[in-house]
Image (cartoon, rainbow, N blue to C red):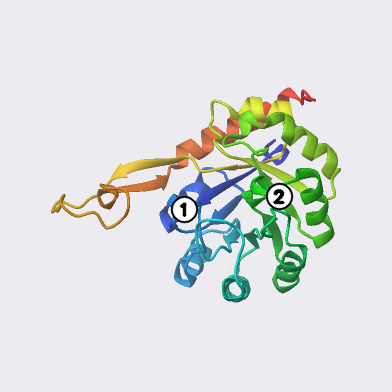
Amino acid sequence: MRESVLLEICADSVESAVAAQRGGAQRIELCSNLLEGGITPSAGLISTVRSKVSIDLNVMIRPRGGDFYYTADEFEIMEQDVVTAKQLGAAGIVFGVLKENGAIDIARIRHLVEIARPLNTTFHRAFDMSRDFARSLEDLVHAGVNRVLTSGGEQKVEDGIPAVVQLIHRADNRIAVMVGGGITESNVRRIVTQTGAREIHASVRVHLPSPMRHRNEKISMGLIKGREYQRVVVLEDRVRRLLQAAVDGCQQGTIAVR
């Protein structure tokens, strides 16, 4: 039954990756620094997660937060990180590179795809920052990318459903279209039913208090005060409920939104 939908969970820790697998997720997107939308995880994190989970592990390749136009030095880092992820047993890589004008950087994307082979490749939500979705999709097909993650150009994918439907139609099975951005167990049925998407990307993270008993509340190590004394983790039961809701949406069939 669950082959009708594939659930990818974004994780930034061993604990979250293990919870995702136990909850029924079929794939993990592993990254660090989710406050910046995710950057490349350390070799130690990749290696440890790979040893703890058996499902597919896709590794984020993003040298910093911010935009997706990279200098030559930053792109060299990305090249080396692809090789590292590959050596550590990743099943795929997740990346995105744009030109200054918002177009897909086909040459650089194709280069990363070649380095990554035979790993599968996902172009992340940098796609939603590109200037022309139709052109960008064709560029990714020609660059040999396996999958694109999109919210339809909106902050939340439920607001981008019409654009997602058009992208899936344009893709015509030449490239997989995975939807993500604000997906919860309360809206995933509608998203799956109305878009026809069969790959779902979600976070399902919750904030838990730190076990630290001694605290210095005067100091904040990051930009958001108080983050030192809370942890953000994926919970197994929330993954399971989200997956079941997505499966229910698939069984309802697709209502095309034009």
Mark 1: few, some, or many residues within 10 Å (few <14, many ≥20)?
few
The quadrant in which the N terminus is found is top right
Foreground pick, 8 / 244 = 8
Residue that appears at 72% across and 26% down = 194
Mark 2 or 1, closer to the camera: 1
Name the residue carrying label 2: 148
Residue 87, position as x, y percentages in the image: 60, 75
Residue 143 percent coordinates (x, y): 80, 61
Mark 2 or mark 1: whose residue is earlier in sequence: 1
The single residue placed furthest to the front in the displayed view is 101
Examine the rendered structure and indicate whether residue 251 appears above or below residue 76: above
Amino acid type, label 1 = Glu
| Residue 175 in view here | no
User: Which residue corresponds to the image point at 56% horizontal and 43% vertical from the top-left?
Assistant: 24
Q: Is residue 246 left or right of residue 217?
A: right
Q: Nearer the viewer, residue 44 or 156?
A: 156
- Identify the residue position indicated by label 1 in the image: 36
Dot 2 falls on a residue whose secondary structure is: strand
Disc 1 is placed on an element classified as helix
Give the answer, above or below, for where 199 lies relative to 241.
below
> Considering only vertical position in the picture, is 80 above or below 233?
below
Q: Residue at x 53, y 37 (%)?
A: 240
* Quadrant for the C terminus in the image: top right
| Res 107 visible | yes
Q: Between marks 2 and 1, how big is the CA–CA gap?
A: 20 Å
Mark linked to residue 71: none
As shown in the figure, which amino acid type bears the numbered disc 2?
Val
Callout count: 2
Rendered view: 52 above or below 234: below
Q: Camera-side residue: 60 or 35?
A: 35
Q: Residue at x 59, y 32 (%)?
A: 244
